[in-house]
Image (cartoon, rainbow, N blue to C red):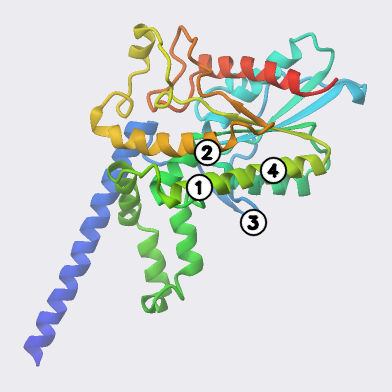
Amino acid sequence: MRKILRVLWLAIKGIVVLALCVEVLSFVVISIGNFVLYGEIREGGRAVYDGYAVFLQSEGIRKTAFNSKSDDAKKNVTIWMLGGSTMRGSTSPDDKTIASQLAKALNASGDGRHFTVTNYGMLSFNSLLETKYLQKLLIESPEKPNLIVFYDGTNDAKYFAEHGTPYGHHGYRRVRAIIESYRQSWFGLLKPLNAAIYCSFTKELYDKIHQMLIPIQPDSAGLNQLARLTEERYDHVNKLAVCYGTDFLLFWQPALWIEQCNVPESVRAQEKGVIMNSERFATVRRNLTLPYMAIKERLHAKPYFIDFQEALCDRTVAAYEPDGVHTTDAGNEMVAQKMAKAVLERLPK
């Protein structure tokens, strides 16, 4: 009997040690991957829990430069901008973000109105979290906007490729683990342990591998569901804006891996990155492209939809960071200039 117990104990210890080794290895792989892609070992920024939006950046709302306000309230226009890290501006100074450059362009347009732009961009946000965040803003903000702008595309594609569900978002697996771990299975009776497994680096690495190696099928039911539910989500935002007497615009953001245009080779060389220029990551690019294009096809005829897929094709300097998604200061300015034209055409005087 003692021999059996000794063998059982050794087996348990072996399993625990193996699990710890796999977890440590997963942590190392994910950290290295984050550093290669984002220049830091963590994905996303410092976050705090929010009852409406799941989480928000601990630093709060990012400042916007070049805003202008008139003593005549009739001349003032307020714009709320929501999006992910590209909208927030993950590395640029406050005056170089898309929101600041938009405020600069609008207030220099000679339109006669005074524009105040607020940058509600949050790192890692997609349309799902932005819709929830907008609900919070409309409930809690005393002053309502004249225009609501979403700047989306890449994060919705990323989280579908990673989690395989239209409800995916940053931290999706971890949030589900905390809520569902008790009744999800008999093993869920050990709630803290079950939640820890779903919050583990091992599970995160599994999701990353799913994104990198398992191709999305263009005719899959999941992809069709993503396009349909995302369309319904934006339609809801548009109806919500109408209820508050404001306008809504969705800019479908550009990305290097989705462009279909010729750019000078000297510019391409400056924008060279690991994922964008290696055949080893062809599946990643494909898995990001299919959801991006599926949603775009579903939305292209919507009155609030503005396609910016090729918005940076006329660039003569590097407009993308090495990850092929985040834009440089020059890229932010180009996007803002073209966005300003669309905003002025949309907003009635």
Q: CA distance from mark 3 to mark 2?
A: 28 Å
The residue that disc 1 covers is 226
Q: Name the secondary structure under disc 3.
A: loop
Q: Which amino acid type corresponds to the residue marked 1 in the rendered image?
A: Leu
Evaluate whether residue 127 shows in this view: yes
For residue 73, which numbered disc appears in the image?
none
Earlier in the chain: of badge 4 and badge 2, it is 4
Q: Which amino acid type corresponds to the residue marked 3 in the rendered image?
A: Gly
Quarter of the figure with residue 300: top right
Quarter of the figure with residue 158: top left
Earlier in the chain: of badge 3 and badge 4, it is 3
The residue that disc 4 covers is 237
Earlier in the chain: of badge 3 and badge 2, it is 3
Asked whether disc 2 touches disc 1, contact meaning CB atoms under 8 Å apart, the reply is: yes
> At 58% across and 42% down in the image, what residue appears?
127
> At 81% across and 25% down in the image, what residue appears?
77
Q: Which amino acid type corresponds to the residue marked 4 in the rendered image?
A: Val
Q: Name the secondary structure under disc 1.
A: helix
The residue that disc 2 covers is 295
Pair 3/2: label in front = 2
> At 9% across and 87% down in the image, what residue appears?
4
Would residue 315 appear left or right of 198 to someone viewing this image?
right
Q: Which amino acid type corresponds to the residue marked 2 in the rendered image?
A: Ile
Nearer to the camera, 237 or 55: 237
Q: Count neighbours of disc 3 (C-alpha within 10 A) and say few if under 14, some if 14 to 19, many if 20 or more.
A: few
Residue 44 in picture, x, y percent from top left = 47, 41
Pair 3/4: label in front = 4
Q: CA distance from mark 4 to mark 2?
A: 16 Å
